Amino acid sequence: MSQITKDYSSENIFIGSPTPAVWRIISNLGFKEVPIWHLPWEIKKYMIDNIAQSLANITIVKEFIGKREFKREKYRCFLKTHSS
């Protein structure tokens, strides 16, 4: 992860994850948590397209329902801007 932030230091980087271990790692790399409604439009559009494609695939829907049986953390969004 640190190599990616170095390679793309002049770019904005978005990471979303429901995993606390990932949250800790990316927080240490300078990423800031951002509420989903404050994300740039391009990221929101990508997420909407991704969800629409996933819902079109019944296998993914079944997997999602199966995974929801386990207790999971909330999905958090992080953004690192090239000026950060």
Image: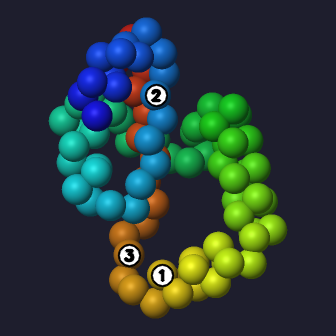
**Where's residue 8, x and y in %?**
41, 17
- Give the quarter of the image for residue 52: bottom right
Q: Secondary structure at mark 3?
A: loop
Q: Is residue 35 left or right of residue 23?
A: right
Q: Secondary structure at mark 2?
A: strand
Q: Specify which label sits upstream in the sequence, 3 or 2.
A: 2
Comparing labels 2 and 1, the label whose residue is closer to the camera:
1
Task: Inspect the image, locate mark 1, and give the three-letter code of the amino acid beneath it.
Answer: Lys
Position of the C terminus, as image quadrant, is top left
Depth check: give the residue in front, 40 or 13: 13
Comparing labels 3 and 1, the label whose residue is closer to the camera:
1
Task: Say which residue label 2 marks.
Answer: 13
Task: Inspect the image, locate mark 2, and give the three-letter code of the amino acid beneath it.
Answer: Ile
Q: Could you tell me how far apart the alpha carbons at marks 2 and 1 are, in whole angstroms?
A: 27 Å
Badge 3: residue crowd in 10 Å (few <14, some 14–19, many ≥20)? few
Does 25 sit above or below residue 40? below
Residue at 41%, 54% (x, y): give it: 17
Depth check: give the residue in front, 76 or 46: 46
Is there CB contact under 8 Å for labels 3 and 1? yes
- Give the quarter of the image for residue 81: top left
**Where's residue 77, x and y in %?**
46, 47
Badge 1: residue crowd in 10 Å (few <14, some 14–19, many ≥20)? few
Task: Inspect the image, locate mark 3, and give the three-letter code of the amino acid beneath it.
Answer: Arg
Would residue 54 be visible to someone looking at this image?
yes
Q: Secondary structure at mark 1?
A: helix
Position of the N terminus, as image quadrant, is top left
**Where's residue 64, x and y in %?**
57, 77
Question: Colour scheme in the image?
Answer: rainbow
Task: Say which residue label 1 marks.
Answer: 67
Badge 2: residue crowd in 10 Å (few <14, some 14–19, many ≥20)? some
Task: Say which residue label 3 marks.
Answer: 72
